[in-house]
């Protein structure tokens, strides 16, 4: 399979998952396939496959910024890096939704955090953490 095809499939899976998180956070299938971690796990398996097949086959490395830049001139390394971002950002977004539900935070307040987690990862996580600090209630242990 071509790198571009894998890229398109991974992007479509991630985008659909994010849309479902945004518009249907309490839908039973959201819980079964996204909040449960299934989609981030699928992306993680794709990442593992790329690492197993292509790790060490690109110039560069992780020891300096110029070497990281060189590493990311290889399409397979870039694809692996992109899927890494997709998996982790979606995992964080899923956690934000689950945590906000447990802490009684309105989903309307979480939506901007999800957008920023999707677009800018750590900024969305920071936004949600601030929101959680101010609006989160202790989860009840029933």
Image (cartoon, helix red, strand yellow):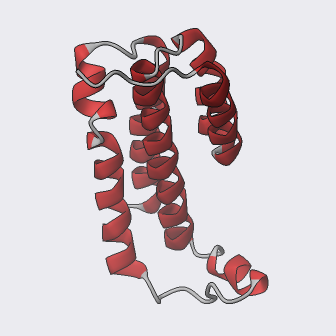
Residue under the point 47% across and 14% down: 104
Across and down, in percent, residue 53 comes to 34, 78
Q: Determine which quarter of the picture holds residue 58.
A: bottom right
In this rendering, would 57 be left or right of 60? Answer: left
Asked if residue 94 shows in the view, the reply is yes
Across and down, in percent, residue 25 comes to 40, 17
Taking depth in this image into account, of 136 and 48 the one nearest to the observer is: 136
Residue under the point 62% across and 40% down: 125
Q: Determine which quarter of the picture holds residue 115.
A: top right
Asked if residue 20 shows in the view, the reply is no
Across and down, in percent, residue 131 comes to 65, 26
In this rendering, would 96 be left or right of 133? Answer: left
Q: Determine which quarter of the picture holds residue 139.
A: top left
Identify whether 35 is placed above or below 122: above
Residue under the point 32% across and 32% down: 34
Across and down, in percent, residue 79 comes to 51, 62
- Which residue appears farthest toward the right when viewing the image? 66
Identify whether 31 is placed above or below 76: above
Instruction: Point out the image quarter for the C terminus.
Output: top left
């Amino acid at each position: 399979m071509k790198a571009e095809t894998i890229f398109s499939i991974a992007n479509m899976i991630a985008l659909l998952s994010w849309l479902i998180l945004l518009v249907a956070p309490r839908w039973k299938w959201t819980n079964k396939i996204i909040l449960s971690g299934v989609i981030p796990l699928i992306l993680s398996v794709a990442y593992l496959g790329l690492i197993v097949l292509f790790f060490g086959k690109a110039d560069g490395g992780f020891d300096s910024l110029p070497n990281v830049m060189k590493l990311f001139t290889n399409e397979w390394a870039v694809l692996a890096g992109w899927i890494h971002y997709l998996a982790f950002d979606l995992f964080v977004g899923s956690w934000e939704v689950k945590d906000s539900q447990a802490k009684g935070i309105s989903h309307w307040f979480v939506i901007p955090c999800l957008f920023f987690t999707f677009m800018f990862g750590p900024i969305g996580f920071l936004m949600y953490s601030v929101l959680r600090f101010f609006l989160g209630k202790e989860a009840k242990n029933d």
